[in-house]
Amino acid sequence: MSFTRSLLACAAACALLSAAPPFVSAAFAGDKSGVDQTSFDKAVAPGADFWTYANGEWVKAHPIPADRNSYGKSAVMVEEAAKRTVDLIQTAAKAGGAGDGQKVGDYYASYMDEAGIEAKGTAPLKAGLARIAAIKDKTALAGVLGGNLRADVDALNSTDFYTDNVLGLWASPAFDDTTKYAPFLLQGGLGMPDRQYYVGDSASMQEARTKYQAHIAKILTLGGIADAEAKAARIMALETRLAQASGSRADSADVQKANNSWTPADFAAKAPGLDWKAFFAAAGLSDQPRFIVWHPTMVTGLGKVAADESLDTWKDYLTFHLLDHYSNLLPKAFVDERFAFYGTALQGTPQLAARWKRGVNSTNAVLGDAVGQLYVAKYFPAQSKAEVSAMVDTMKVAFEKRIDSLDWMAPETKAEAHRKVDVLKVGVGYPDKWRDYSGLKVVRGDALGNFQRSEVFDYQTTLAKLGKAVDRGEWVMTPQTVNAVNLPMLNGLNFPAAILQAPNFDASYDAAANYGATGATIGHEISHSFDDQGAQFDSQGRLRNWWTPSDFDHFQKAGTALALQFDGYKPFPDLAVNGKQTLSENIADVAGLAAALDAYHASLGGKPAPVIDGLTGDQRFFLAYAQSWLTYARPAALRQALVTDGHAPAQYRALTVRNLDAWYAAFQIKPGDPLYLSPEQRVKVW
């Protein structure tokens, strides 16, 4: 999950651990290896390409389905979760009744009513289009832009909507005050995934710009807008100006650059050109004493573009984005055109996903907790929650022991590191408190209106948080999500139920596989509190340097070495992995895998690991880890990820094993093997 979407802070400190407690053993009685040997490509040596050795035969046997841009075992888990979820939703749709179950059923049934959506055409957007047409001056423009402000939340597992309002509002504790929620403003305004698509000079970026301008013209034409091609050119020019002012991926990940506290008066002084008083009044933010402006260059640029561009161009821009934003809830021609650009042109996906899959995604995005309650009641028993919770305890202790063993870290730095581990609030499976949807109106037969009301509901929920005490138990993922997250400013972790299932986790597996897959995931998320971003926050979630100068210098040198290691992975002749862009995730992978291996060894209680299916314990551990990264993408999707994603491609994340000495012993990796790193080249961060 991206950093700016997941930084939530905690408001509580805790006492220093005087000593690490003994390991809490998360023992598993199962005797299955948990490793799929039918996936092995034995024509490839482990020391040549460990990911392909572990997964090659599976990849050969499973081409990417036509409706996906990537595939793998995690995608199979997502599909299984979707199948389970649609059954629950359809049952709710048939049952009727009242409460959240009825809202789930009505929302999904409305989304699936293609005939009803087709019959309405663009009529559901009549009021929005009229509001844009009525803009007569720059004050009115500011009012519409502010009125369009929405909560910047990830619609996880949903590809239905891009965030394309000029700014997004995010409620989080401020960097210097972790007791109350403050308003953060984040950059937006772009229809393509990243500023690089507008300013990059590569052939693929130039092609994307040409196709995007054609997409703008097509959407306008479908919406009955005259002179579409000329207007598309002007819209593209406006967005390019916004992109040029926008922060880069590196800027967005640098919290020091994001720590900008502005009063309302600062906006007129630092970003003149937009009527900020009208903007904030329309956004319901007039009473806020200050804002944290994550991307100041874009806000300043927005003021300039608001002043310089004609009202007519702004009105065309707003018209296009209104139509494009809701196109998946408009007639089929809009749906097909949106997919042709965002799905096929940008990611190489040849076929639109089935309507029911998109309906599940949209329902999860809007009523995720309501669906999640149904999901965990049927598919996540208390035993699973207890077993994973025990693993979490084991992993926390393993990490604490690793802190104690660091010979380069000063006692005062270790003390705060221990506090950070101790204060971690870990959610397993589902939140302690479910979201209240009583304020959300869902009307059967009003698909687009239902989604619009959900956006307003989310926004009002965000506004209501501002100035209030922080809820450390807040979740940002639904239980049916195949993912996990660290919340650095909350010092919290979320492990949704759907990722805590086979093949990642199964109580019938031997401990090696469970620790190699799920244990490494847990370790990864814990380690995010200590990656290049999370390490800048103390145990209370404050942005504060708690390191001695020499300790931080050592830490940064390790990060630099890891970034260089990943810079060497080159999926395309003209495009490599960006080691700096992916550094946070790579640090968490290295530290998490090392802690998971420690925890696995400790779980053996001093006894030798059994040999199962001819594999030693350490072999099963590392193979389970490599198989947890069994994901592969279409070339276009991989290119997009290399530009926009903070995660390295899965096949390279599996190669994290190169940094652990035990991997070399387990598979007899020798100097001269392509993946061999000399001991001094192996990166040890924590």
Image: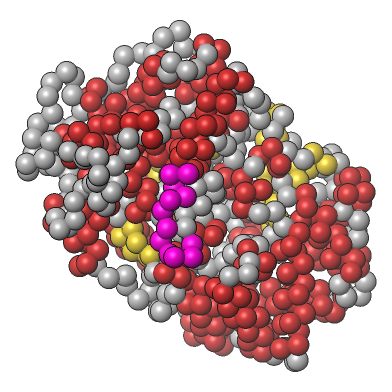
The residue at the point 55 percent across, 32 percent down is 556
Question: In the rendered image, is residue 281 in sight?
Answer: no
Does 642 appear in magenta? Answer: no
User: Which portion, as a residue range, is magenta?
Assistant: 564-575
Position of 365 relative to 128 (above/below): above
Q: Horizontally, is 75 left or right of 475 in the view?
A: left
Residue 374 vs residue 196, the one in the foreground? 196
> Residue 210's image quarter?
bottom right
Residue 197 in view, yes or no: yes
- The structure residue drawn at horizontal position 20% and vertical position 33%, both measured from the top left corner, is 665
Which residue is at the front of the view, 81 or 370?
81
Image height check: is 254 above or below 305?
above
Q: Position of residue 490 (x, y in %)?
A: 57, 33
Figure check: 523 above or below 270: above
Residue 192 lies in what quarter of the image? bottom right
Residue 97 appears at what percent x and percent y?
45, 61
Q: Quadrant of the C terminus?
A: top left
Q: In the figure, is residue 453 to the left or right of 677?
A: right
Residue at 32% x, 39% y: name it: 677
Main SS of the magenta segment? loop
